[in-house]
């Protein structure tokens, strides 16, 4: 398994409204899933070998709610699939890269992930997931 763009995360005010355009295009949209610890509800839209992740806040304290309040709807993060997540984290830490949290978390579909802070990536919130 090589590196790949796993998905692009997009912060939206309304999942129903946001997913409609993709359905209109003829893409199929996954059932809604809630990730309690991130306070988000999401759907995945497979596009070729990658996916769009549409994210709606389930509470005002959600990072997605705060992102939208500050910057409006739009691209929230880029997610890269890595062959070995633990090794990737070790390598980044050794090189002084700032992670949002060093703890590996479990997200939608049960995948393991961490976020790399935008201050280390040229302004883009970078999610890394285990392949
Ligand atoms: Co994501």
Image (spheres, rainbow, N blue to C red):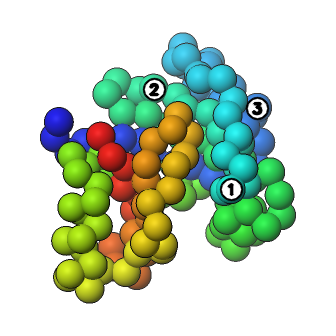
Q: Callout 2 environment at 10 Å: few (<14), some (14 to 19), or many (20+)? A: some
Q: Residue furthest top?
A: 26
User: Disc 2 on helix, strand or loop?
Assistant: strand
Q: Please, is residue 52 above or below residue 31 in the view?
A: below
Q: Determine the residue positioned at 19% across, 71% down.
A: 91
- The residue under the point 36% across, 33% down is 50
The span from disc 1 to disc 2 (Cα, nearest Å) is 24 Å
Question: Upstream in the sequence, badge 3 or badge 1?
Answer: 3
Q: Which residue is mark 1?
A: 37
Nearest the camera: 91 or 62?
91
- Image point (29%, 67%), residue name: 89
The mark nearer the N terminus, 1 or 2, is: 1
Quadrant where the image shows the N terminus:
top left
Q: Is mark 1 within 8 Å of ligand 1?
A: no
Does residue 82 appear to the left or right of 57 in the view shown? left
Q: CA distance from mark 2 to mark 3?
A: 17 Å
Residue 106: percent from left, percent from top: 52, 49
Mark sitting earlier along the chain (2/3): 3
SS at mark 3 in the image: helix
Query: Does residue 12 appear in the picture of this structure?
Result: no
Which percent across, then down, holds residue 60?
A: 83, 64
- Which residue position is annotated with label 3? 16
C-alpha gap between disc 3 and disc 1: 22 Å
Q: Secondary structure at mark 1?
A: helix
Q: Nearer the viewer, mark 1 or mark 2?
A: 1
- The label shown at residue 112 is none
Other-residue count near label 1 (Cα within 10 Å), few / some / many at <14 / 14–19 / ≥20: few
Task: Identify the residue position indicated by label 2 in the image.
Answer: 46
């Amino acid at each position: 398994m090589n590196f790949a763009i796993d998905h692009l995360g997009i912060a939206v005010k309304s999942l129903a409204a946001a997913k409609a355009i993709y359905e209109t295009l003829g893409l199929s949209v996954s059932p809604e899933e809630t990730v309690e610890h991130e306070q988000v509800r999401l759907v995945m839209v497979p596009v070729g070998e990658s996916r769009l992740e549409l994210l709606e806040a389930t509470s005002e304290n959600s990072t997605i709610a705060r992102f939208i309040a500050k910057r409006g709807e739009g691209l929230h993060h880029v997610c890269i699939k890595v062959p070995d997540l633990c090794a990737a984290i070790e390598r980044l830490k050794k090189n002084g890269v700032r992670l949002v949290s060093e703890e590996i978390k479990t997200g939608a579909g049960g995948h393991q992930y961490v976020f790399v802070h935008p201050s280390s990536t040229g302004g883009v919130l970078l999610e890394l997931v285990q392949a």
